[in-house]
Image: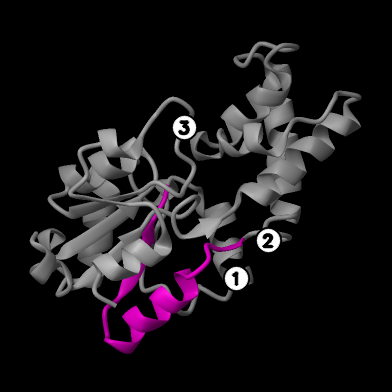
Amino acid sequence: MSLASLAKAEAILFDLDGTLIDTAPDFIGVLNRQLQAHGRATLPPEKIRASVSQGAKAVVALGFADRVNTDSPEFEALRQEFLQSYLQHIADETVLFPGMDALLTMLEARGTPWGIVTNKHSMFTTPLLRALQLDMRCKVAICPDMVSHSKPHPEPMLKAAGMLNIRPEACVYVGDHRRDIEAGRNAGMTTVAVGYGYVLEGESAADWDADYLVDSVAELATLLRI
């Protein structure tokens, strides 16, 4: 998709954590409170932030893997404890990335639907979107429990496009992880990698073979000609 046609994309789809919204502050708070409750030292926020894109298991492992095997019932109990606490604090500090609300508002003003394709379970996605008042603005939100295969499989991408009644090749998918770009590409969508998200330590968004790469929401807005 050329820059000229990119501006005419019929729908923009986003990954959730690390792309559309900054959920890291709440992950950091929940894990460090859990560590304190178990008599363990807290971790630096930047260390936890780098693991958020890998999900709750990776975040909990960061704090407890030296004590328990990640395949053990004890670890699963810690993960469930973390998830229950996260659900209670799901939007204490989570916010849209700077400039994202303006980008979404402009998409809405020009009649371009936007949606979400995430590997975050709907148990957490639904209350989070409601808390941020995004649930009525988002035209589609696909979570892993709604499909048989999660990203990088194309199924959730194709389901989102189908629910919007828009051809996948007319959609743009924006994400901050290699699997996001692979999923978008597997579905035939134009892909945009964002370097401002939760890029894993040692990785570079430039290596994911996305169609476009941006390092800020402002650059994304410029790319979409908003």
Marks 1 and 2: in contact by CB < 8 Å? yes
What's the residue type where badge 3 is placed? Leu
Please tell me which residue lies in front, 143 or 172: 172
Q: Residue at x 75, y 54 (%)?
A: 88
Please tell me which residue lies in front, 183 or 2: 2
Graded by Cα atoms within 10 Å as few (under 14), some (14 to 19) or many (20 or more), the crowding at tag 3 reads some
Graded by Cα atoms within 10 Å as few (under 14), some (14 to 19) or many (20 or more), the crowding at tag 2 reads some
What's the residue type where badge 2 is placed? Ala
| Residue bearing mark 1 | 132
x and y percentages locating residue 199 in the rendered image = 45, 38
Precedes in sequence: disc 2 or disc 3: 2
Marks 3 and 2: in contact by CB < 8 Å? no
Does residue 83 appear in this view? Answer: yes
Cα gap from disc 2 to disc 1, whole angstroms: 7 Å
| Residue bearing mark 2 | 91
Residues rendered magenta in the picture: 95-118
Q: Residue at x 68, y 42 (%)?
A: 83
x and y percentages locating residue 142 in the rendered image = 38, 57
| Residue bearing mark 3 | 200
What's the residue type where badge 1 is placed? Leu
Callout 2: helix, strand or loop? loop
The image quarter containing residue 45 is: top right
